[in-house]
Image (tube, rainbow, N blue to C red):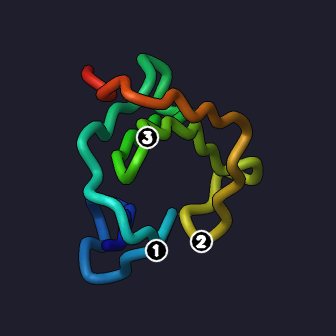
């Protein structure tokens, strides 16, 4: 499964944020729109925070992550 982002002005030009085998259960932007939370589940719940340091959609960096066994990620 891929998580992709695009600019609303050019929706045909998508950029992969993350590729994973797990099912993504949470996708949430922070209020400022600078950080994206991606939550998924495989054997354990995994939450990651991603950002674009240069504000370009083709450059994504993971800034934080946590893995919590036996806990589902909920928004």
> In front of the other: label 1 or label 3?
3
Residue at the extreme bottom of the image, as rendered: 12
Residue found at x 59% / y 44%: 50
Q: Nearer the viewer, residue 69 or 67?
A: 69
In what element is the residue under mark 3? strand
The crowding category of the residue bearing disc 1, from other C-alpha atoms within 10 Å (few below 14, some 14 to 19, many at least 20), is: some
Residue 12 screen position, x and y as percent: 26, 82
Circles 1 and 2, Cβ within 8 Å, touching? The answer is yes
> If you read the primary sequence from the N terminus, does the residue marked by circle 1 or circle 2 appear first?
1
Residue named by callout 2:
58
Residue drawn at (64%, 59%) of the image:
60
Q: Is residue 71 above or below residue 65?
A: above
- Dividing the picture into quarters, in which one does residue 56 lie? bottom right
- Decide: marks 1, 3 in contact (CB < 8 A)? no
Q: Dot 2: few (<14), some (14–19), or many (≥20) neighbours within 10 Å? A: some
Nearer-the-camera pick, 22 or 35: 22
């Amino acid at each position: 499964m891929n998580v992709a982002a695009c600019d609303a002005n050019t929706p045909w030009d998508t950029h992969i944020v993350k590729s994973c085998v797990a099912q993504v259960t949470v996708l949430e932007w922070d209020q400022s729109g600078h950080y994206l939370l991606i939550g998924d589940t495989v054997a354990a719940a995994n939450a990651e925070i991603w950002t674009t340091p240069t504000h370009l959609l083709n450059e994504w960096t993971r800034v934080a992550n946590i893995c919590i066994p036996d806990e589902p990620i909920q928004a």
